[in-house]
Image (spheres, helix red, strand yellow):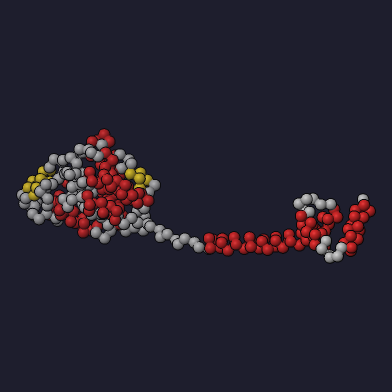
């Protein structure tokens, strides 16, 4: 009850007056801080409330701005920087394929398949490049031809490596490896025959293509040890045609008779008048009406 609580307080103040020194005033303040933990009576608790109340808002008001400001300063540099735009590549440059050819194909066109097999991952990266960047409408004729010639040759090498060692490409896929549909370029799937007979021959109508594509056989025109590009296409097609026609391994030519590759028989329609065509590149001029024969085709692997 209020009268009972007020009586001890009056007695305490009366005793303090009789003391010689006002020391009891200090002990009265100290117990107030300890009394918080000891759950004091309502009278003592009332004395402590003014001291506690101002401290709490001071602590809160000083800490809150700091906690809000720091994250804002740290987050700002993470949001503002943006990665530089990556250049969009639209055409393969055939440099990967060119490097493999120089390292693993001899000047005579023989292929080191054993060594090349250790570079399958490199070859695959080039094939993926061909897949991701097929010819587009803004490509030049030379760019398109170079792409399809390189694709034919690179996927033929891939076919051999996937089955190496193998004596002949004709041992694969039931003797019809050129009809095996497995070549993914863009959003389409092709066979080797699709590339040669549905794209290269009918679209570009250039018989020199036959001296550029390689079927991995000994009697096939040698695999050129450099990649075809738009820049070197014309000169390389001419040099390949001339080298093949004048190579006695593939063609025997005199002025009065010729025994030439079976390719000239299989694709006779592409060459027109054969003797006239051969005379464009042959170092020996062939007489009109000379006897024409065709060599047997050796399908053994063109490796070493």
Residue 279, by quadrant, is bottom left
Total numbered labels placed on residues in the image: 0
Q: Residue at x 21, y 56 (%)?
A: 236
* Residue 250 image offset from top left, x and y in percent: 13, 47
Q: Residue at x 35, y 56 (%)?
A: 91
Name the residue located 84 percent from the left edge and 52 percent from the top edge: 41
Front residue (pair 172, 120): 120
Vertically, is 298 above or below 270? above
Q: In this rendering, would 76 be left or right of 124?
A: right
Q: Is residue 1 visible?
A: yes
Name of the residue lying farthest toward the right? 3
Determine the residue located farthest toward the front in the rendered image: 20
Residue 106 at x, y = what percent?
Answer: 18, 50
Residue at the bottom extreme of this rendering: 21
Q: Is residue 20 left or right of residue 83?
A: right
Residue 209 at least partly seen: no
């Amino acid at each position: 009850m209020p009268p009972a609580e007020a009586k001890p307080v009056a007695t305490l103040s009366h005793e303090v007056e009789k003391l010689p020194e006002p020391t009891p005033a200090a002990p009265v303040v100290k117990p107030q801080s300890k009394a918080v933990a000891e759950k004091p009576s309502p009278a003592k608790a009332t004395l402590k409330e003014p001291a506690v109340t101002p401290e709490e808002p001071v602590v809160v008001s000083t800490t809150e701005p700091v906690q809000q400001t720091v994250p804002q300063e740290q987050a700002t540099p993470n949001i503002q920087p943006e990665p530089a735009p990556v250049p969009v590549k639209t055409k393969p440059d055939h440099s990967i394929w060119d490097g493999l050819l120089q390292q693993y194909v001899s000047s005579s066109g023989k292929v080191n398949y054993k060594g090349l097999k250790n570079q399958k991952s490199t070859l695959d990266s080039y094939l993926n490049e061909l897949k991701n960047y097929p010819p587009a409408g803004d490509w030049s004729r030379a760019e398109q031809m170079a792409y399809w010639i390189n694709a034919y040759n690179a996927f033929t090498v891939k076919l051999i490596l996937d089955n190496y060692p193998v004596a002949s490409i004709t041992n694969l896929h039931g003797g019809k490896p050129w009809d095996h549909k497995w070549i993914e370029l863009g959003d389409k799937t092709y066979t080797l025959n699709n590339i040669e007979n549905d794209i290269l021959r009918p679209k570009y109508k250039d018989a020199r293509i036959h001296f550029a594509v390689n079927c991995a056989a000994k009697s096939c025109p040698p695999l050129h040890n450099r990649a075809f590009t738009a820049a070197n296409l014309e000169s390389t097609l001419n040099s390949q045609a001339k080298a093949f026609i004048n190579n006695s391994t593939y063609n025997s030519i005199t002025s009065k008779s010729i025994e030439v590759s079976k390719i000239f028989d299989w694709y006779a329609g592409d060459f027109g008048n054969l003797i006239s065509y051969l005379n464009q590149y042959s170092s020996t001029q062939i007489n009109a009406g000379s006897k024409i024969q065709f060599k047997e085709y050796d399908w053994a692997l063109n490796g070493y």
